[in-house]
Image (cartoon, rainbow, N blue to C red):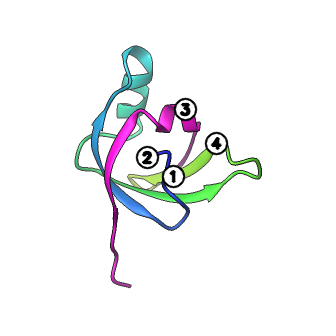
Amino acid sequence: MDQMKPGQQARVRCLRACGGMRRRLQDLGLTPGNEVNCRLLSPLGDPVAYEICGALIAIRRKDAKTVEVDGPLCTDS
């Protein structure tokens, strides 16, 4: 997920995080099958804002790296 650019959308494949961070990411909605949209980069590139289940969440790149995604998905707008 850490390689996504603003405007890209993907679907969560799996989480590689462990322990408390895994639970936190799951609580945010990062579960297999859910869509995630990359929305904004901070000025220095970390953290990155993602839209997950309708909420805008800032996640550090090192934590986003533990989320494997399928995508980016193509969207027909």
Q: Position of residue 70 (x, y in %)?
A: 29, 53
- According to the picture, the residue beneath numbered tag 3 turns out to be 62
The answer to which of 52 and 61 lies nearer the viewer is 61
Q: Residue at x 54, y 32 (%)?
A: 62
Give the secondary structure at mark 1. Answer: strand
Q: Position of residue 25 (x, y in %)?
A: 41, 32
* Lower sequence index among marks 4 and 2: 2
The answer to which of 6 and 49 lies nearer the viewer is 6
- According to the picture, the residue beneath numbered tag 4 turns out to be 47
Amino acid type, residue under disc 4 in the picture: Pro
- According to the picture, the residue beneath numbered tag 1 turns out to be 50
Task: Point out which mark residue 1 bears.
Answer: 2
* Lower sequence index among marks 3 and 2: 2
- Could you say which quadrant of the image residue 13 lies in? top left
Neighbourhood count class around disc 3 (C-alpha, 10 Å): few under 14, some 14–19, many 20 upward = few
Give the secondary structure at mark 4. Answer: loop
Q: For the magenta stretch, what is the residue range?
A: 57-77
Task: Confirm whether the magenta stretch covers residue 66.
Answer: yes
Give the secondary structure at mark 2. Answer: loop
Q: Are marks 3 and 2 in contact (CB under 8 Å)?
A: no
Amino acid type, residue under disc 3 in the picture: Lys
